[in-house]
Image (spheres, helix red, strand yellow):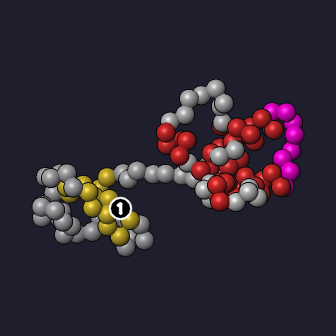
Amino acid sequence: MPIYEFKCLTCGALRSVLVQGFKTPEGLSCEACGSKDVKKVVSKVSYHQSQSDRLSSYDPRSRHSDSYLKDTRNIGLHAEHMLRKAGVKPTEEFQNKLEKLRTDPSRVIKDEDV
């Protein structure tokens, strides 16, 4: 069952509706103002990028936004990029430590093993 978003053309409120089938349900109204003047809209989408794709698209010369720097999945990308560029395959130990850092970055402070 798809979830569709509807926008109220009177007040602009958005509403998500679980729909059986693919037809717009009858009698749909705005939860905010009660208007029946609603229109199905295209929802925003997001996708998951694999770590391999992140590494392939990594450019060490580009400036990164705050959101990029706060994303723990980006920890170690530069190191991985440099290893790939040098033709060196990262060891399993390196990959394990990098995964620990990405999963729990505060562990660097708590645990000397990382």
Name the spot of residue 100 as percent of width and height, x first. 70, 58
Residue 17 quadrant: bottom left
Tell me what residue is drawn at x 38 percent, y 65 percent: 3
Is residue 111 in the magenta section?
no
Question: Which quarter shows the C terminus?
Answer: bottom right
Q: Residue at x 70, y 37 (%)?
A: 78
Q: Nearer the viewer, residue 35 or 101?
A: 101
Residue 89 among magenta residues: yes
- On the rendered structure, is 74 left or right of 81? left
Which image quadrant is residue 26 in? Answer: bottom left
The residue located at (36%, 51%) in the rendering is 42
Image vertical order of residue 3 relative to residue 108, above or below: below
Residue 92: percent from the left, percent from the top? Answer: 84, 55
User: Which residue, given by chain and number where applicable, does mark 1 sit on?
Assistant: 4
Residue range highlighted in magenta = 85-92
Q: Secondary structure at mark 1?
A: strand
Q: Is residue 64 left or right of residue 75?
A: left
Type of amino acid under label 1: Tyr
